[in-house]
Amino acid sequence: MGVAVNSSDAVIEVTDLTKVYRSGLFGSKKLKALDGVSLKVQRGQIYGLLGPNGAGKTTLIKILLGICRKTAGHATVLGQPAGSRSARQEIGYLPENHRIPRHLTGDTALEYYGSLSGLSVSEVRKRRPKLLELVGLTGRGRERVSGYSKGMLQRLGLAQAIIHNPSLVVLDEPTDGVDPVGRKEIREVLKNLATQGTTIFLNSHLLQEIELVCENVAILTKGKVRRTGSVRQLKQELGDAPVLLQLEGAESEIRRIVAGLSQVGIRKSGERLFEVEWRVTSQKTLDGVIDQLRAADVSIWRMARRELTLEEAFLSIVGGQD
Ligand code: ATP
């Protein structure tokens, strides 16, 4: 790793960041893609940036990488202004839908990208075997990338992003289009890197993926940060974990009792068998429903609380805004 940082230091620090795109005649049309965004990413974190289409995720990444200029506010990478040469040297980047020239092999692609990161060919060759092993491509380096699967291309993309041992790796939709086995492998690589102190900043719309790999997230909608925090915290904050009830009894009675509840789903699984899933708002309401079910001679076969998924938490937060 190039720049030494204390474990408490922020690797990414963004304060009141604003970006206005101008288009049209003399830049008369304005679009505020980022509107006072603030967030902090600590060393060794795998941090997820979530948001619906057009939320401003790519714009934020582009400012961090120096591809696009901010309009106002502050953004630093390892304490240096985002986009500066010194900051950029510390970043590895895997863009969304990246294209590796088809005539290259895995090995020559790493030589090409390594040289773009300022490494000599001999240095790349020295690092290559370990790198290919890390991303699960050992023995595949001599094959042309034109024959690589989407998963292999993403893993090679990841290898090129970390070839210069960056302190921060920025990934835009790294597992998009990759099969479940490939996704799991990529998650393992990311966790390995984080354990070694590399910070990962991940932009993905695959919420289940984010949930499996990120400890912390920021939720962005319409250019504003709606929430930041740990995945666990977000899920707990929104409380009301769903309760699943498996019931046996008269359909009319069951439907009558659950009719007054909000956010309830009911599924018939047999002649007198029903599954009811419901976002319980208080223990008192739950107790009341159970009393009513028993009074109506409905048997409760099973009752289980289910943890809220990140997707449900996300939808609660962005719901009503998009
Ligand atoms: P997606 O998930 O669809 O990639 P995103 O969250 O990455 O979305 P951005 O690509 O950052 O969002 O776009 C934020 C807003 O800025 C959108 O309304 C988009 O149309 C607009 N925008 C992005 N790039 C430009 C540009 N170069 N000129 C003008 N408007 C732009």
Image: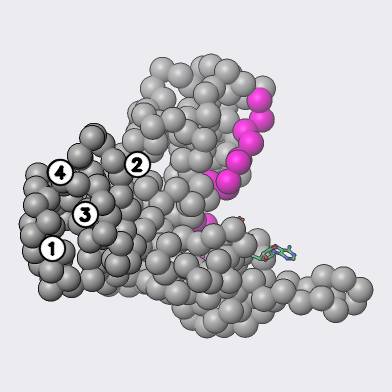
Disc 4 on helix, strand or loop? strand
Question: Which amino acid lies under the numbered mark 3 shown in the image of this protein?
Answer: Glu
Q: Quadrant of the N terminus?
A: bottom left
Q: Which mark is residue 187?
A: 2
| Distance Cα–Cα, label 1 vs label 4 | 14 Å
| Distance Cα–Cα, label 3 vs label 1 | 9 Å
Q: In terms of sequence position, does the residue under pointer 4 or pointer 2 come before the other?
A: 2
Q: Which mark is residue 292?
A: 1
- Residue drawn 12% across and 56% down? 296
Disc 1 on helix, strand or loop? helix
* Disc 3 target residue: 253
- Residue drawn 66% across and 30% down? 101
Vertical position of residue 146 compared to residue 151: above or below: above
Residue 66 on image: x %, y %: 62, 64
Which-is-in-front pick, marks 2 and 1?
A: 1
Which-is-in-front pick, marks 2 and 3?
A: 3
Q: In terms of sequence position, does the residue under pointer 2 or pointer 3 come before the other?
A: 2
| Distance Cα–Cα, label 4 vs label 2 | 42 Å
Question: Which amino acid lies under the numbered mark 1 shown in the image of this protein?
Answer: Gln
* Disc 4 target residue: 248
